[in-house]
Image: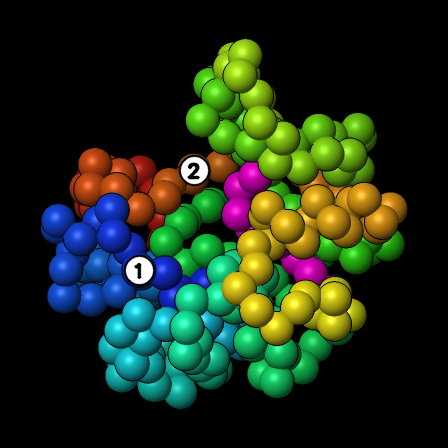
Amino acid sequence: MQAVLLAGGLGTRLRSVVSDRPKPMAMVENKPFLEHLTGALKRNGITDIIFAVGYKGSMIEEYFGNGEKFGINASYAYEEEQLGTAGAIKNCMPLISEDSFFVLNADTFYDLDYSRLTKLAQDNDSVMSLVLRRVDDCSRYGTVKLEGSSVKAFNEKSDKGGEGIINGGVYLMTKKLLDEIPHRKVSLENEMIPQWLSKGYDISAFVNDGYFIDIGVPEDYFRFQEDVKEGRVVTI
């Protein structure tokens, strides 16, 4: 299976502690965060990795090369300008060779069984399948409405707060969806997924309870370092 890792962001919130490299290359126990992430993918049988890179992207390519050293096949799609999440995926189109592929944010780590996503897509004949997570306070996030395994609404704002289901940032997409993404800066979460739902496309999802972290802010980056060091999360 192929996976697109979205690694083109500027990482401005982490600049105070990681200023010399792209955010996904922040060091964790003597390895860049991306090596921990690709190691987890490899354990799930996902070894064909497309890095969607932008800011200081050459540092990622210099580290991983063709991926052979890490037991993966690595390729790179460079953004000449910020394209947003959907635009970055569209930019990878020439490198995507399979009918369906995973998409992940390269600055988050979610401990999950990726085969669940594949099975869900097959069982529901979905054009796209998502991994969701449950949070105690959803007031900061757009929420997802789920009926059974079918997504009915996505990224809806909630002022009430309280427990809710939100996007986990792991997707399984069918390649035909790429034709519908415009050649410009465009958001997968804010524009394309709501648009596909409005067209009646079958998008399925499940809620995963595994370990999750986004290293985008210093306190969470430091927490992930400690979690890896103490063995609270298994990466490579």
Q: Position of residue 13 (x, y in %)?
A: 25, 46
- Could you tell whether 142 is left or right of 219 in the image? right
Residue designated by label 2? 211
Question: Which color scheme is applied?
Answer: rainbow
The tag on residue 182 is none
Looking at the rendered structure, the secondary structure element under dot 1 is loop
- Could you tell whether 107 is left or right of 194 in the image? left
The answer to whether the residues at label 1 and label 2 have Cβ atoms under 8 Å apart is no
Q: If you read the primary sequence from the N terminus, does the residue marked by circle 1 or circle 2 appear first?
A: 1
Looking at the rendered structure, the secondary structure element under dot 2 is loop
Which residue is drawn at the image coordinates 29% and 81% (left, top)? Answer: 58
- Front-most of 232 and 194? 194
- Front-most of 116 and 142? 142
Main SS, magenta region, reads: strand
Say which quarter of the image contains residue 207: top right
- Three-letter code, disc 1: Leu
Numbered range of the magenta stretch: 166-174
Q: Position of residue 117 (x, y in %)?
A: 68, 51
Instruction: Answer few, some or many: residues within 10 Å of disc 2's Cα (few below 14, many 20 plus, some between 14 and 19).
Output: few
Can residue 69 be seen here? The reply is no
Q: Position of residue 73 (x, y in %)?
A: 48, 82
Residue designated by label 1? 10
